[in-house]
Image (cartoon, rainbow, N blue to C red):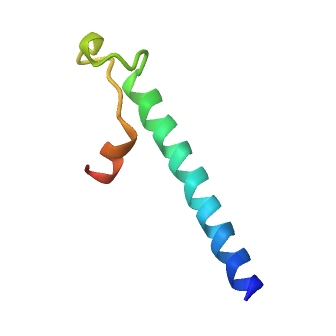
Amino acid sequence: MSRIIETFTSLLLAFLIGFIIVFLGINLLLGCETWDSSLWTDRNSCLMPLELFGL
């Protein structure tokens, strides 16, 4: 049983690290400079974390 929990935790951790890397990479490409959406332009905008899931 502990082997299953260990495998599940490892997979969950790998998913979370991958999600963070993709999230940061997309925002880097978008030129995200501020989280204030009123200051976003066509060239500088940000992707919110829930937008990756379509929420």
Left or right placement of residue 7 versus residue 39 in this view: right
Residue at 63 percent of width and 75 percent of height: 8
Image vertical order of residue 23 relative to residue 55, above or below? above
Which residue is situated farthest in the front direction here?
A: 1
Residue 1 position, x and y percent, is 72, 89
Residue 9 position, x and y percent, is 66, 69
Left or right placement of residue 20 versus residue 55 in this view: right
Residue at 37 percent of width and 27 percent of height: 30
Image vertical order of residue 4 relative to residue 47, above or below? below
Left or right placement of residue 54 versus residue 22 in this view: left
Left or right placement of residue 17 versus residue 35 in this view: right
Which residue is situated farthest in the bottom direction here?
A: 1
| The image quarter in which residue 15 lies | bottom right
Residue 10 position, x and y percent, is 68, 68
Q: How many marks?
A: 0
| The image quarter in which residue 42 lies | top left
Q: Pick whichever, 31 or 12, lies toward us.
A: 12
Residue 43 position, x and y percent, is 29, 17
Residue at 33 percent of width and 17 percent of height: 44
Which residue is situated farthest in the right direction here?
A: 2
Image vertical order of residue 2 relative to residue 13, above or below? below
Residue at 54 percent of width and 44 percent of height: 20
| The image quarter in which residue 4 lies | bottom right
Image vertical order of residue 5 relative to residue 25, above or below? below
